[in-house]
Amino acid sequence: MLGFLINRLLQAAAVMAAMTVIVFVGVHAIGNPIDVLIPPDATQQIRADVIARYGLDRPLVEQYLAFVGNLVRGDFGRSFVFNVPVAELILSRLPATAELTLLAVLGASLLGIPLGIYAGYRPRSPVSRAIMGASILGFSVPTFWIGLILILTFAVELRWLPAGGRGPTAVLLGVPWSFTSGEGLAHLLLPALNLSLFKLALLIRLARAGTREAMLSDYVRFARAQGLSELTVIRGHVLKNIAIPIVTVFGLELGSTLAFAVVTETIFSWPGVGKLIIDSIRDLDRPVMVAYLVLVTFLFVVINLVVDLVYGALDPRLRPGAAG
Amino acid sequence: MTGGPLAAFWHDFRGNRVAVAALVVVLLLLAGALSAPWLAPQDPYDQVTLSLLDARRPPGFVGSGGYVHLLGTDPSGRDMLSAILYGLRISLQIGVFAGACALVAGTTIGLVAAFVGGRLEQAIMRVVDLQLSFPAILLALILVALLGQGRGQLIAALAAAQYAYFARTAHGAAAAERRKDYIEAVLATPLPAARVVFRHLLPNILPPLIVVATVQIANAIALEATLSFLGLGLPITEPSLGMLIANGFQHLMNGRYWISIYPGVALMVLVVAINLVGDQVRDQVNPRLRR
């Protein structure tokens, strides 16, 4: 077990190292940030000052080494645009994205898995067909378009919910949150719904596909032959066997929800990390882009690691050292 | 069921009415996009035919051109139906091109990995798996940011974000086929390896690749629309459906829903129809559901 853990940790570290190189080189190929930062009519002196201040005159290798050294110390540099430390900037936007993402993923799982199991258990019933039809919609219609429809329906036509922004926040444990007040929840609801629909559809499809295959399997046939009730068969045999792909996807989706939050946050003007990265791409705000990419990679590596470890807990066959 | 595997396939496909309807919709939209210059009442990008008197009119308005604007007009007096037909053209072009590039690149990589084996295979597939754990939208976003804007850059970004799905599928199928007797038999002949891979192995792993391709074309169209909506896609001179939707977004709040909603409906119908067709093909190809 320990060897397995060390092996996985080394792999994760290698991925992180490779990613910092790719991100750094990639971001430096985008274009000349000097042109963005300095007005064309600036004097030679101002140009030289800015270049020296951001270290843009040093060789790439030197800039990279300085960059990695700073990363390890948790120093991501200063944003070109906001002129504040990037770490501070991202941390200040993180709670908004965190509560949005968690609410979306939680809602999608609590609803999606039961619906999917039902659709797989009774694949030919009209209800299952309706569930699957809706899931294809949620799966294939682009997130931003669903967001527009939600705004048009609930904000413009019905005027039930606000169209965008975060609303008032209340401080809990030193961090501002929206979910603690009714007004904040109202602002949170539409973006969270928008963000959850894709995951909801995905979980429905996964749970359905797993259940359909499980229902045809010998172990379900034998469980039924033992006279177990259908509910026991589903809970004890089907659910356990479809748990692995669902846990994998759930883990990975937690990360990809962050990516989709980019779209949702832009539509609903939600002041989270996603909106920050879009703005920084548009403004060529390199330190923010780099920090975001490195953090997202880190997150993915950690999630992958955790998913691998959870596998072992869920399926004895996958435990390292298990026979066969 | 006579007439070979294709006829048998069609016989099964016909059993699902929804999938048949979806296929008809896809073909109609494709025909509409291809014949846009003849079908559209107006060339939406010929400034001469635009009149500001016709701007922001609701659907059904008869404009200065003397014909009915079935889906209304946008802020520069452009007929929305025409804009949508031309936008559909651009969206489909990007989706099909990006999907094809990803298919060729991904399949080649997957096949090479499965055939060469050893360390190289492990290294390639590790990179592919790593990329698969990264959401395509994020990759496309980063690549567009790195490569800059334009049609070629966008196609390259979409293909690079999507090739991994093909590589994984091709690798899995090829690795299974490679151990079968017929491949061992051809390998024993002095035929060049490339011929074995492309003439004998490739045809046998095509079905799963076709399934991935349908879904990925739909994904590429949706991705392109998303990027264009965020202002990171095609340049403004080539308005795809995504950009039409983005342009109409600000008017949505003022109740002029048609500028944004109708291009969105076109996008939604297109993407959903392709996915429905892909779903049915997948169910037919999946041997595990055949009992």
Image (tube, coloured by chain):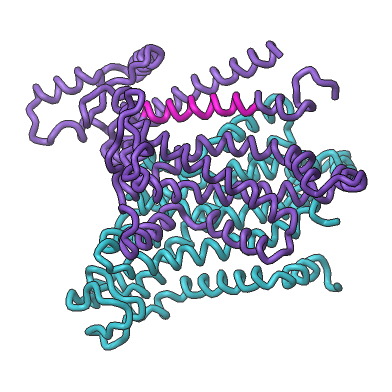
Chain colours: A purple, B cyan
Residue B127 seen in this snapshot: yes
Residue drawn at x 20%, y 76% is B51
* Residue B234 among magenta residues: no
> Which residue is nearer to you in this view: A266 or B201?
A266
From the viewer's perspective, tell me whether residue A324 is left or right of residue B255: right
Residue drawn at x 39%, y 30% is A292
* Residue A301 among magenta residues: yes
Q: Is residue B10 above or below residue A165?
A: below
> Which residue is nearer to you in this view: A27 or A160?
A160
In percent of width and height, residue B200 lies at 79, 49
> Which residue is nearer to you in this view: B139 or A164?
A164
Quarter residue B173 falls in: top right
**What span is colored magenta in the figure?**
A290-308
> Which residue is nearer to you in this view: B120 or B28?
B28
Residue drawn at x 31%, y 72% is B44
Q: Is residue A130 above or below residue A110?
A: below
From the viewer's perspective, tell me whether residue B135 is left or right of residue A247: left
From the viewer's perspective, tell me whether residue A291 is left or right of residue B194: left
Number of on-image labels: 0
Q: Quadrant of the N terminus of chain A?
A: top right
In percent of width and height, residue A114 lies at 65, 48
Residue B139 seen in this snapshot: no
Quarter residue B143 falls in: top left
In percent of width and height, residue B246 lies at 33, 57
In percent of width and height, residue A135 lies at 58, 56
Residue drawn at x 25%, y 76% is B57
Q: Main secondary structure of the magenta part?
A: helix
Q: Quadrant of the C terminus of chain A?
A: top right
